[in-house]
Image (cartoon, rainbow, N blue to C red):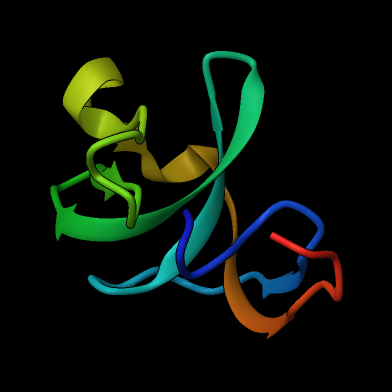
Amino acid sequence: MEPALCDGDIVVARAKKPTVGDVVIAKVQGREVIKRVTTHLPDSLFLQGDNKDYSTDSRQYGPVATRNVMGVVWYTHKSRKKR
């Protein structure tokens, strides 16, 4: 999700229905990912990373079921680590 989020950043998510433009935490293929919602489908979402040239997202693994969304990010705290 760089440049929006980087390793070491802290995110807080809450349970709510995601909308297009939201950043979500979702379970995909057995791991947790943080991606932005780009399209809402009837029972799923198309998720995409902000760094499109280097992101593995719905363009590779397809739409993600809405039941796999763990939360919508509503707060971030930037790490003080050098990037």
Image position, residue 66 (x, y; %): 40, 45
Image position, residue 8 (x, y; %): 81, 57
Q: Quadrant of residue 64?
A: top left
Task: Specify whether 42 is left or right of 71.
Answer: left
Q: Residue furthest right?
A: 80
Q: Residue furthest front?
A: 82
Number of residue marks: 0
Kindly identify the residue that appears in the image at 33 percent across and 50 percent down. Answer: 51
41 shown above or below 74: above
Q: Quadrant of residue 12?
A: bottom right
Q: Is residue 28 visible?
A: yes
Task: Specify whether 28 is left or right of 15.
Answer: left
21 shown above or below 39: below
17 shown above or below 58: below
Task: Specify whether 39 is left or right of 70.
Answer: left
Image position, residue 9 (x, y; %): 76, 66
Kindly identify the residue that appears in the image at 35 percent across and 35 percent down. Answer: 55
Q: Name the image quarter holding the C terminus.
A: bottom right
Q: Is residue 63 visible?
A: no
Kindly identify the residue that appears in the image at 48 percent across and 57 percent down. Answer: 2
Task: Specify whether 18 is left or right of 2.
Answer: left
Q: In terms of depth relative to the viewer, which is nearer, 78 or 14?
A: 78
Kindly identify the residue that appears in the image at 39 percent across and 68 percent down. Answer: 18
Image position, residue 76 (x, y; %): 69, 80
